[in-house]
Image (cartoon, helix red, strand yellow):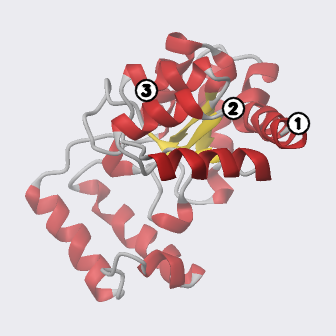
Amino acid sequence: GLSNSGKVLIDKMNGLGIMVDVSHTSRETTLQAASYSKAPVIASHSGVMALYEHPRNLSDEEIIAIAAGGGVIQLVAFDTYMREVNSENRAAINQIREELGMTAPDAYKYATQETLGEQRRRVAELDAKWSRANVSTLVDHIDYVVNLVGIDHAGIASDFGGGGGVQGWDNAAETRAVTDELRRRGYSIEEIQKIWAGNLLRVWSRVEEVAQSS
């Protein structure tokens, strides 16, 4: 959870107009950050725990807490946050990472776009044997947040620079597929604009307002 120094840090972030991002924090810290921050907090790239139990995904309690403060959960197109990966499949993915020199924790930070693209291409070749999560799976996570806390609190993250990618949305050129799936499910243009950008921009504006009033 948050120590006193952590609370001081969040207060300083609020004062400086820096967004508080809980995507890499524990459940307890997420709840405390959402409660303590004077400005809305975000989860920049997370999934829904109720749909797939993964340490990086958010429980209903966390989603509700983030939304209660006006924040946004950006549902991430990260394959292994949305499906069970068996040991053989995981070994094949790890072998690709090893061959490309992508095994270190900070490898994605320093990899070239060519290397990241090659990794996504080679992982996609495994789809014939082990189907990855797809665009529909991603939108299931968006639907869940919208149904739980409302359209104003859902967003989207690709995480292409950190290993993201699902069937149908493996690069920026395929982005239209996500919008098409949202339209197929009945979302309006205005709602889709909120999900893609409007909700996060609203939070950004509110973060700046809090900083100016501090």
Contact flag, marks 3 and 2 (Cβ < 8 Å):
no
Looking at the image, residue 32 lies above or below residue 19: above
Q: Position of residue 140 (x, y in %)?
A: 45, 25
Q: Nearer the viewer, mark 3 or mark 1?
A: 1
- The image quadrant where one finds the C terminus is top right
Q: Amino acid at mark 1?
A: Ser
How far separated are the C-alphas under marks 1 and 2?
Answer: 11 Å
Residue for badge 3: 62
In this view of the protein, can residue 76 be seen by the observer?
Answer: no
x 42%, y 37%: residue: 47
Secondary structure beneath disc 2? loop
The first of marks 1 and 2 along the sequence is 2
Q: Is residue 27 left or right of residue 37?
A: left
Q: Position of residue 22 (x, y in %)?
A: 50, 44
The first of marks 3 and 2 along the sequence is 2
Q: Amino acid at mark 3?
A: Glu
Question: Which label sits on residue 213?
Answer: 1
Q: Amino acid at mark 2?
A: Lys
